[in-house]
Amino acid sequence: MRGVFVSLLVLVGLSVFSQKKSAPKQTRILFVFDASKSMISKYENTTRMDGAKNLFFKFIDSLGKDKTYMFALRMYGHTVKYPPGDCKDSKLVVSFAPNNLAIIKQKVMEAKPTGITPIEHSLTEAAKDFKDNKTTNIVILITDGIEECGGDPCKARQKLLEKGIVFKPFIIGIGLSPEQIKTFECVGTFYDYDDQSVFSTISNIIQQQKLLKSTAQVNLLNNASLPIETNVNTTFYDVNKKEYKYNYIHTLNYLNNPDTLLLDDYPLYKVIAHTIPPTESKEVKLAAGKHTIIAIDAPQGSLNLTRSEGAYNANEKVKCVVRKSNDLNTLNVQPLNSTEKYITGNYDLEILTLPRIYIEQIAIEQSKIKSIDIPNAGILKIRCLEAGDGALLLNRKGKLEWVCNLSTQTQQSFNLQPGNYVATWRAKALRGSIYTIEKQFSIRSDNETVVEFFR
C-alpha cells in the first residue's frame, strides 16, 4: 500500500431515544484496525504497525476505565496476502460484549501486516456491526494509508448515518502532502502525528462524548440588515461536488431567531434562498465544533393581485407574469387573488386577461404590500349564421390593437376587459375582402354584450 500516514477516525452517533437522567448512558465503540502490508514500513525509530498498536493501546487503556463503554474490534487487510490482496478482506474479529478488552488487545497484539486497504468496504461493513441506534455509537479507524480498492470513504458515510452514526472523525497524519490531505477532507479534521497533544485532545473528546457539533444559521437579512425574513426554502450546495446536500424551509425559532442547523463541516457550502428572484450566500466553510452565521441579503415585500368575484369571472383563471423591470425573463406566474413575496425592487406585470394588461415599474418595498386591483371582465357573445373568419381589436384612442382571432364557430364567447372594441368578420363562402363586416361595441364589467354578423 502507498499510504504515508497513520490516521484515527472517530464517528459518533447520537441516540434519538431519551433516557432517564439517573441511568448511565451506554456507549458502543468499534475499533477498525488496519493490518495491511504497508504497516511494515518504517517511521522514525519504529514501524507504522508498532506505532499504530501503541496508539491503540493508549486509547483502549484510557477508554476502558469507563464501565459504560462496550467495545468491539474489526480488522482489515489481515487474512489475504498482498499481492494480490482482497478488497473484501474485512472482518468483525471481536463482537460487542462486556469484559472483552483483554481479547481485543490480544488480537491487535497478534496482528501481522499482510494484505490490502479496503477503507470504504470496511466502514460500510462497520455499520452492520451495530445492532441498533439506541445508544451512542462510535467508530475508531486506525490506518496508515488511503483507499486502495477504488472505493470512496465518503460514500460509506450514508451507511453509517442510517445506523445513527454521525461521521465526526479525527485524522492523524505523518508528512501528508496537500493532495493527500484532500483525500480525506470529506471525513475529518487533520492533526499532526508528531503533536504531543493529539492523544490527550482526542481522548478527552471521546471520554466526554462530545460531538464537536458544527452548527449554522442562515440569516435572511432585510434592508436594515436585520435577520427577520423567513419561511423561504433554502438549499445548501456542496460547491466541490456541485450537488445539493440539504434542503430546509427557513424558520425563526420560538425566540424569533433563525433556527440552528446541525451540519457536516467538511463541504464548502453555498446557500441558495429560493426567494423571488433567488438570492444566495457567499461560499462558506464551516468551522468544526463552532457556530457559523451565513448571511444572505433577502429584503422582501409583497405583491397582492385582487379581482372581485364578478358575474363573468368564475371560469376565467387569470394569472400574471412577473418580471424584473427591463428584463424579459419570467420570474413568476402569480394567480389573481393571491399574495406573493418578492425581493424589493421594481417589477413589470403582464396580466393574462383578454386583452392583456401591462403594468410597468411596480415598486416592491420592504415589508409592505403592493396591491393591484384588476377590473372585472364583461362577456362578449358572437353570433354568426355560417362559418367565417374574423378578429377582435381594442380601440385605444383611435388606434386598433389586435386582441385575438375569431374561430370558425357560429357562436362563441369571450371574457373581455372593459373598453371599446371593433369586431370584423367575413363569411368563408365569400372570397372578396369587400365583404368584411365591421361592428363597434363597448364592454363593461359584469355586463353581457351580443354582436351578430349576417352577410
Image (tube, rainbow, N blue to C red):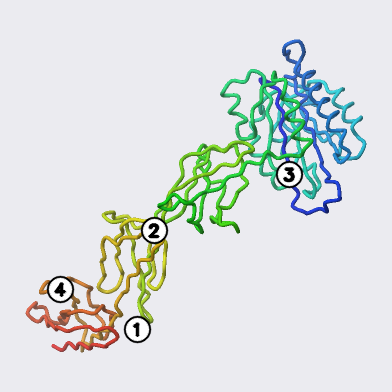
| Mark 2 closeness class: few <14, some 14–19, many ≥20 residues within 10 Å | some
The amino acid type found where label 4 is placed reads Arg
Identity of the residue drawn at 57% across and 38% down: 286
The spot of residue 141 in percent (x, y) is: 74, 31
User: For numbered disc 3, what is the local secondary structure?
Assistant: strand
The three-letter amino acid code for the residue at tag 3 is Gly
Q: Secondary structure at mark 4?
A: strand
**Mark 3 and mark 2 residues within 8 Å of each other at the beta carbon:** no
| Precedes in sequence: disc 3 or disc 2 | 3
Drawn side of residue 331 relative to residue 17, left or right: left
Q: Which residue is mark 3?
A: 13
Q: Nearer the viewer, mark 3 or mark 2?
A: 2
Residue tagged by mark 4? 396
- Residue 126, picture quadrant: top right
Q: CA distance from mark 2 to mark 4?
A: 36 Å
Q: Residue under circle 2?
A: 366
How many other residues sit within 10 Å of disc 3, few (<14), some (14-19) or many (≥20)? many
Find the distance from the CA under tag 2 to the CA under tag 1: 32 Å
Instruction: Name the residue beneath numbered marker 1.
Output: 310
Give the vertical position of 202 relative to 286 (above or below): above
Side of 302 where 260 appears, left or right:
right
Q: Residue shown at 12%/83% (left/top)? A: 437
* Distance of label 3 from label 4 (alpha carbons): 71 Å
Q: Earlier in the sequence, mark 1 or mark 3?
A: 3
The type of residue carrying mark 1 is Gly
Residue 99 at x, y percent in the picture: 93, 36
**Relative to residue 114, is residue 316 depicted above or below?**
below
Of 450 and 277, which appears nearest the observer? 277
- Mark 1: give few (<14), some (14-19) or many (20+) Cα within 10 Å: some
Residue 339's place in the image compared with 230, above or below, is below
